[in-house]
Image (spheres, helix red, strand yellow):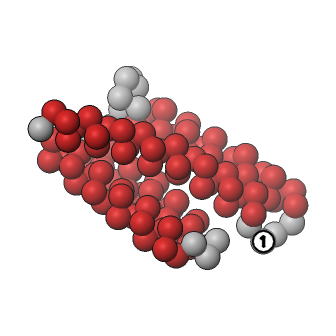
Amino acid sequence: MERLKTINLLLAFFIEIGAVLVLGYWGFTVKTDSWIRIFLGITAPVLMMGIWAIWCAPKSRYRLKGLRLFLLKAFIFILVACCLVNMGKIVVAALFTLLVVLNLSVSAYKHTL
């Protein structure tokens, strides 16, 4: 069972890194003016990292717990999936969502949320 916890923590790390990359890529490729693309490409991932550092990071002073943490993580990852859909990456969005559901389910089960 300890192996499952380790694998799930590794999966969570890759999901989080992937989310930052997707938000940046989405921001730089959205169909709008170039200055808005630059703004979104920089701001979206930085905003996610800031929110994550304050309320989701394991050693954060203000880390949320339980259902609030679960809902914030789910909300962030739903936004990332929506960005993937907006880019036309439906299959990738579905796979990402499946991995998030798996990760959050195991985290809730193992009390590592």
Is 101 or 37 nearer to us in this picture?
101
Q: Residue at left 67%, top 60%? A: 26
Q: For the residue marked with disc 1, what is the amino acid? A: Lys
As drawn, the residue found furthest toward the front would be 3
Q: Residue at left 63%, top 41%? A: 46
> The N terminus appears in which quarter of the rendering?
top left
As drawn, the residue found furthest toward the right would be 34
Is 56 or 92 nearer to us in this picture?
92
Q: Position of residue 83 (x, y in %)?
A: 58, 66
Left or right side of 44 for 95: left
- Which picture quadrant has residue 2? top left
- Which picture quadrant has residue 66? top left
Question: Above or below — where is 51 with respect to 82?
Answer: above
> The C terminus appears in which quarter of the rendering?
top left
- Which picture quadrant has residue 27? bottom right
Element at badge 1?
Answer: loop
State the residue position of label 1: 31
Q: Crowding at label 1, few (<14), some or many (≥20) Cα neighbours within 10 Å?
A: few
Q: Residue at left 46%, top 32%? A: 54
Q: Residue at left 55%, top 39%? A: 49
Q: Is residue 66 visible?
A: no
Q: Position of residue 108 (x, y in %)?
A: 19, 47
